[in-house]
Amino acid sequence: MDDSQPDAGPPRDFEALRNRILERHGAMPKRLAQVARHALDHPDRMALSTVAELAEAASVQPSTLVRFAQSLGYSGFSELQSVFRAQLRDRWPDYRERLARVKDESGTEPARILDRFIDTAARSVADLGRTIVPGEFDAAATLLARAAHVYILGQRRAFPVASYLAYALGKLDFPAILLDNVGSMADVQAGRIGPADTLIAISFNPYTPSTIDLVRFAAQRGAAIVAITDSVFSPVSAEARARLEVVEADHGAFRSLSATMALAMALAIASAEVRDAG
Amino acid sequence: MDDSQPDAGPPRDFEALRNRILERHGAMPKRLAQVARHALDHPDRMALSTVAELAEAASVQPSTLVRFAQSLGYSGFSELQSVFRAQLRDRWPDYRERLARVKDESGTEPARILDRFIDTAARSVADLGRTIVPGEFDAAATLLARAAHVYILGQRRAFPVASYLAYALGKLDFPAILLDNVGSMADVQAGRIGPADTLIAISFNPYTPSTIDLVRFAAQRGAAIVAITDSVFSPVSAEARARLEVVEADHGAFRSLSATMALAMALAIASAEVRDAG
DNA sequence: CCGTTTCTGGAAAATTCATTCTATTTCGAA
DNA sequence: TTCGAAATAGAATGAATTTTCCAGAAACGG
């Protein structure tokens, strides 16, 4: 009987890996301990650097990195590194806790579907902080604050966001005009847009052609465009004075709108603050 | 005399790189534009994947990635990738700083307002898992799946949710009818509601009286009511066959809708699953 | 419509990289 | 001090990845 079998298998996520390293650190040979320490002190380098670079940084031979990985049960350094990389990709608050519940990606029971959507929504929201460029958000808020009228355009999937913005901006006492296209009269509704005005255009792939047309029309009349899209290359972005990019984690063919709603709300409040401050 | 020299040098930080790509995108040949787009839409992958993987993901030859990098002034793909990697590394301190700022409830600079909304939205979404009773969610999905017609009602702040549900359910091939009250004709729109139908009513405090009236009308005609509200004591809840309670963390007078949107999306998909299973 | 330039796909070549192997060193126990 | 086991360094190997190259296709200008 071989009770020395140390691992059922190597840790597959960062948390477990970290714990195992901490556990073993005391009993490790000198060089391996040195590597262990370096690994936990600079996890981002572990994720991105090559064996040679890490060896240099930790004052160790390249082969030591490989031995280290193998002593933890991995087949080689590359396998160990993938754990660090996954961690770099996915880190956001409470990720583990939620992941544990969603782990099983299959299952069509309603409760499980809800869990999965909670997970993707949380992901999208957390990503907002990364994808929004602070300067652009600032610029957008200022454009709204200074506008004589704020026109709001968003169709199909983007319409809920547009209607929410219209509600929030209206409540905040902005001169907000929702281009809802009732009776196909969006062009009439926007007929008097001009250089003193700002148009918020919300559009996601696939981009509704009439949205793009209306944006071009507004730009031509000198209005400032604030774009909320899922890609900086969207046709709407091209005309925009400020670009806000939202990447919703998608879920099959369906994308949630949670992050976009959070952004919309924040934009409304921020604009009011800018207006009232100046 | 060579004024065609396009760059003093390739961008060394992500911000500059991003701007240069945006600048040039319009004038790029087809395949390079394709890569450009993929690069800015998936910066994480650009940082972590190999040329072959990225080529596959962008539907392009590996050599195109290299040509893309060179067209921006880099010596090859590896040099370009290092910029993406640096960006990925530096994101972490950023995030930490962000969290620290969120704690500080004051501050009216736009960027800080955005941080706070991201935080509250994330909390609301996470709370969904706790406030939704699985059995009720199940029941709601089943009621939608079995309905002859699905009527959707939500006004004012709840309207964005209602319109989103109408969009999603419609896409999923449900017989969805949005009671948008255009021309104050909600009662006419709902005139033929009956026992085989389900009405999704979305309502938050302060409850819009006409919503409550319409819910009572529908209940009287025998329709099943699914309520999405912020309190089980809401007047709409009283009539409901299934109750979904969403508590959005509020932020001053304004409540985000992020969690409610996630719930709406999940409900739509879950209903489709229930329908297609049985 | 033709000639020229630019762009693209694909495969071959070159480079970088992780891993393995072996001789040597270190460490601990007797 | 000596022996044996474990650990290490460094070069050699082989695999993976990037880069180059060129023939052919597409776009462009006359």
Image (spheres, coloured by chain):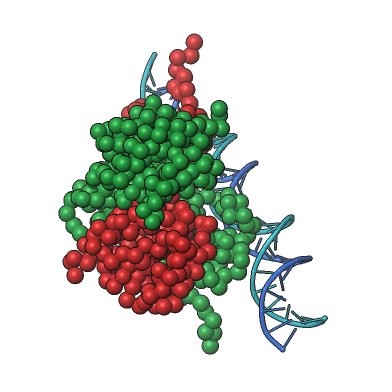
Chain colours: A red, B green, C cyan, D blue
Q: Residue at x 29, y 32 (%)?
A: B238
Q: Residue at x 52, y 79 (%)?
A: B5
Tag count in the figure? 0
Is residue A89 in view from this perspective?
Answer: no
Quadrant hosting residue A11: top left
Q: Position of residue A90 (x, y in %)?
A: 41, 43
Is residue A274 in view from this perspective?
Answer: yes
Q: Position of residue A246 (x, y in %)?
A: 41, 55
Q: Position of residue A168 (x, y in %)?
A: 29, 56
Quadrant hosting residue A225: bottom left
Quadrant the C terminus of chain B occupies: top right
Q: Is residue B29 depicted above or below B152 in this figure?
A: below
Give whichever of B241, A15 is nearer the camera.
Answer: B241
In this picture, residue A126 sits left or right of residue B53: left
Give whichever of B271, B192 is nearer the camera.
Answer: B192
Q: Is residue B156 depicted above or below A189 in this figure?
A: above
Give whichever of A247, C13 is nearer the camera.
Answer: A247
Quadrant hosting residue A122: top left
Q: Position of residue B82 (x, y in %)?
A: 46, 57
Q: Residue at x 42, y 55 (%)?
A: A159
Q: Residue furthest top?
A: A1
In this picture, residue A58 sits left or right of residue D30: left
In this picture, residue B85 sits left or right of residue B95: right
Give whichever of A195, B10 is nearer the camera.
Answer: A195
Q: Residue at x 36, y 53 (%)?
A: B184
